[in-house]
Image (cartoon, coloured by chain):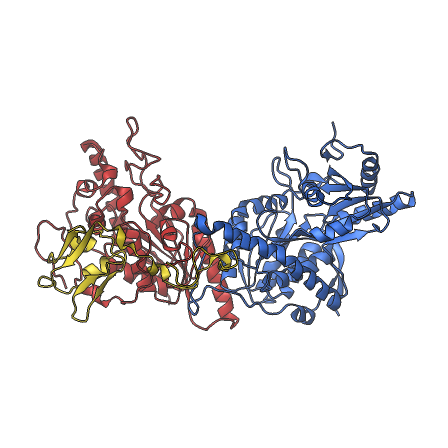
């Protein structure tokens, strides 16, 4: 998981005060494995409003160059907020096993 | 720009549909954090930081957000961040503010404003953190305090707090055979903060992201203490489906249970309009397992109280004057 | 160099902090510390030091604000006593875990039950496990010197730990004593500006106070312990420098007339001066008495202790706190433990003295020595001079 030092650290390696000097390195922990369902976008219905992006608690939905959106499945926990909030119902929650 | 698409199944929103595109794309609270699926508080933190920007120091009380975001050796925070203990995010934050102010004045750090923002849950703010909050706010520090209120001590297992609403079932005030849940009404902390004569007090909710971010930006500009009370959904604690996170916040507003307003220099103003005929509280309560034991009579009692509190707030909205307006005319 | 003044010791301690040009003070008043708080605020509001003074609403907030301030890189000072120290005690181990060189002036006062505002060590003794460096001052001069030394030791990059300076409440704080107050130029030479290891600032983003899972908590504790243990080297070094610059000598354990002593008293804090007189009187009577005075309590001065007790037959340790139901007073327990493996060690006995401000006179110390020599004490520790 940690690319800087081997984990778990020795007492000599541990940062003083257990400080973390790599802002945002929680991104090395992939919460995508928590998912039971995943959001799938139907771009023919998408109106490119950005509501799915703004309401994602993980901040894992990003806008592509074409203006459409998709989730980063390394982090998506499958909460379903994006699908529920999508105005034109362009997002469907699909079982992971399918 | 009201672009409500008529769909009777969804709640009606008045919402600037394309406004999300105006928010900064930069993420200061990254994925990889260990919050539950559908956590309203994690979403609110993500939105708050977009509005605050990088020149911010966050002081975080012990609680869900601290624990899920800072498991050594990782951190989900891309701004400077400190956690010390449970009751003291306001006092640590006041020390951060004093330190930054002194160092900047003495030329020991860069000459630009870095805002101290202290955050905590309803437990760490309204109960154990109450003293520190009151002290920090009354001393006039240039500090914003944001309370993320999900109405119980969620991190330790959904125990009752002074933010827990009437009759909600929590693990220390459960809906039992003899006593049906929490027996008192929610403490009104925004009112208590208004009584501290702060330049700016506001309520917010993760379901109204643009409103929340605007309030955070406004509070950041204040050169003094400011307070935002942000209502956030907890699907785990409220026993509600994770995907209804945003919907529940909207229903809280539309029933009048959690109105969105700001108090600037003592003057009250609603920031998100509520329909003239508010939705019945039943619509909000039915979607949450913590209220599933409620009888029709109990729901009526809640409705009556919500109506009274709404009217109390509206009296202030209609009649309050800012301290500026109240200053005696000169000359 | 330096000016000889007659000054109330509490005021002098604040003056010493002012010489160190602190950036932030966060203090809540409590008897008998209040003059420290008040004088610090005088200094700030008169503009003698460019600093912020936070009139916090409780001691818990005082140390919390001090942590927040120190974490931004500001040189931070606080002060308290007794109940205040207990109230902020939740934060003490956090301050040391975060490696923040906060300096805390403690006007030692008895801990409640019953409430008592007078002097003993029952406030600081429960805090010995919290990872702070601990100095004990015997007189006003030491209070001033140790306050300045505290900033220097705590901020040293090899240390990075908070330091508390203990001065007996009323017995020291409210006494007007002759003190040589260093001048600003001397202190500037001794104490360099604070260069923090990490700070809360967007120019170099850091997260402080993270969650330590069981996999690393023990390593974090060992790391802190090693830092505290190793800090004794820095203390000795700083004290040597102090002696070279100011001409006043400091040692972790100061010995008085122990070269040929058979029986010695051990004290901490202001009682040392009274005990010295008792030793002189006993010597006149032909008793080979001596005195050991602890100046450095944490990190524990093992080496200095072993040297100091060489040749002693009896060591009468005086404690000014009780560890209820325990194996003896806190100092006594630690001294005994530290000397357990030493083959030739004195018989160690324990008197609990001066609790709640009870006066201890020269005759009392002489009596303690005589009775200790005869082995006439209650076991395992004796409440000295308690009626009944």
User: Which percent across, then down, holds residue A81?
Assistant: 20, 53
* Residue C163 in view, yes or no: no
Counting labels gives 0
Q: Work out whether residue C318 or residue C353 is closer to the camera in this orientation and state it.
A: C318
Chain letter for yellow, please: A
Residue at x-position 84% and y-position 51%: C257
Image quadrant where residue B127 sits? top left
Q: Is residue B103 visible?
A: yes
**Residue C385 location (% of width, % of height):** 76, 34
Residue at 35% x, 61% y: name it: B219
B53 to the left or right of B129: left
**Looking at the rendering, in which quadrant would you find the C terminus of chain B?**
bottom left
Left or right? Give the position of A94 relative to C196: left
Residue B215 image offset from top left, x and y in percent: 30, 60
Residue in the image at 56% along x and 63% along y: C75
Residue B218 rendering spot, x and y as whole percentages: 32, 63
Which color has been applied to chain B in this rendered view?
Answer: red
Say which quadrant the N terminus of chain B sits in: bottom left
- Residue C329 is drawn in which quadrant? top right
Task: Name the tint of chain C in the rendering.
Answer: blue
């Amino acid at each position: 998981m940690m690319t800087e030092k081997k984990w778990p650290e020795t007492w000599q390696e541990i940062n003083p005060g257990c400080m973390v000097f790599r802002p945002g390195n929680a991104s090395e922990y992939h919460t995508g494995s928590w998912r039971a369902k995943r959001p799938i976008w139907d771009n023919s219905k998408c109106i490119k409003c950005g509501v799915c992006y703004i309401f994602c608690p993980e901040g894992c939905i990003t806008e592509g160059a074409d203006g459409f959106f998709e989730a980063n499945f390394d982090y998506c926990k499958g909460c379903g907020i994006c699908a529920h909030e999508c105005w034109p119902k362009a997002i469907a929650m699909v079982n992971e096993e399918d | 720009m009201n672009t409500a698409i008529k769909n009777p199944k969804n709640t009606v929103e008045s919402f600037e549909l394309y406004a999300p595109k105006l928010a900064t794309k930069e993420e200061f609270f990254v994925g990889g954090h260990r919050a539950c699926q559908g956590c309203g508080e994690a979403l609110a933190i993500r939105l708050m930081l977009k509005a605050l920007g990088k020149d911010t120091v966050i002081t975080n009380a012990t609680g869900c957000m601290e624990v899920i975001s800072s498991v050594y050796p990782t951190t989900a925070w891309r701004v400077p961040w400190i956690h010390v203990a449970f009751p003291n995010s306001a006092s640590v934050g006041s020390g951060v503010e004093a330190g930054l102010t002194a160092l900047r004045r003495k030329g020991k750090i860069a000459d630009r404003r870095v805002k101290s923002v202290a955050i905590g849950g309803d437990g760490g703010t309204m109960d154990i953190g109450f003293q520190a909050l009151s002290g920090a706010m009354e001393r006039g520090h240039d500090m914003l305090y944001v309370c993320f209120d999900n109405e119980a001590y969620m991190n330790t297992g959904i125990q009752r707090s002074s933010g827990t609403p009437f009759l909600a079932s929590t693990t220390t005030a459960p809906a039992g055979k003899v006593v049906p849940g929490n027996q008192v009404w929610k403490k009104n902390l925004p009112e208590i903060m208004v009584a501290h004569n702060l330049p700016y007090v506001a309520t917010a909710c993760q379901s109204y992201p643009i409103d929340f971010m605007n309030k955070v930006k406004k509070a950041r500009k204040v050169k003094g203490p400011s307070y935002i009370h942000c209502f956030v959904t907890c699907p785990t604690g409220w026993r509600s489906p994770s995907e209804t996170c945003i919907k529940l916040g909207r229903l809280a507003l539309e029933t009048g249970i959690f109105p969105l307003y700001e108090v600037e220099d003592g003057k009250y103003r609603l920031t998100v309009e509520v329909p003239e005929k508010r939705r019945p509280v039943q619509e909000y309560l039915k979607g949450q397992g913590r209220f599933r034991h409620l009888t029709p009579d109990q729901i009526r009692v809640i409705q009556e109280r919500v109506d009274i509190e709404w009217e109390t707030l509206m009296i202030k909205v209609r009649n309050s004057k800012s301290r500026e307006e109240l200053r005696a005319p000169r000359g | 160099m330096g000016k000889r003044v007659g000054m109330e010791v509490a005021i002098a301690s604040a003056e010493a902090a002012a010489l160190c040009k602190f950036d932030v003070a966060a203090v809540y008043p409590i008897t008998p510390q209040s003059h420290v708080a008040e004088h610090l605020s005088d200094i700030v509001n008169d503009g003698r030091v460019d600093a912020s003074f936070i009139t916090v609403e409780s001691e818990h907030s005082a140390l919390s604000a001090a942590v927040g301030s120190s974490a931004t890189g500001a040189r931070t000072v606080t002060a308290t006593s007794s109940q205040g120290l207990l109230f902020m005690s939740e934060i003490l181990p956090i301050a040391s875990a975060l490696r923040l060189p906060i300096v805390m002036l403690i006007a030692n006062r008895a801990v409640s039950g019953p409430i008592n505002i007078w002097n003993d060590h029952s406030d600081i003794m429960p805090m010995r496990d919290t990872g702070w460096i601990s100095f004990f001052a015997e007189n006003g001069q030491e209070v001033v010197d140790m306050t300045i030394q505290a900033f220097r030791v705590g901020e040293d990059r090899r240390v990075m730990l908070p330091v508390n300076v203990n001065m007996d409440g009323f017995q020291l704080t409210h006494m007007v004593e002759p003190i040589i107050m260093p001048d600003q130029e001397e202190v500037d030479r001794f104490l360099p500006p604070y260069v923090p290891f990490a700070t809360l600032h967007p120019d170099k983003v850091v997260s402080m106070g993270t969650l330590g899972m069981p996999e690393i908590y023990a390593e974090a504790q060992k790391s802190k312990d090693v830092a505290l243990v190793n800090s004794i080297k820095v203390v000795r070094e700083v004290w040597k420098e102090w002696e070279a610059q100011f001409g006043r000598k400091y040692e972790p354990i100061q010995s008085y007339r122990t070269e040929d002593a058979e029986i010695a008293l051990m004290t901490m804090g202001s009682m040392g001066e009274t005990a010295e007189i008792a030793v002189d009187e006993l010597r006149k009577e032909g008793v080979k008495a001596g005195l050991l005075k602890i100046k450095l309590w944490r990190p524990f001065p093992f080496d200095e202790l072993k040297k100091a007790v060489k040749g002693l037959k009896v060591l009468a340790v005086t404690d000014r706190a009780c560890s209820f139901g325990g194996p003896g007073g806190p100092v006594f327990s630690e001294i005994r433990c530290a000397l357990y493996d030493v083959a030739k060690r004195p018989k160690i006995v324990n008197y609990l003295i001066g609790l709640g401000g009870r006066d201890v006179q020269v005759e009392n110390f002489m009596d303690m020595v005589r009775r200790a020599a005869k082995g006439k004490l209650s076991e395992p520790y004796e409440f000295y001079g308690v009626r009944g």
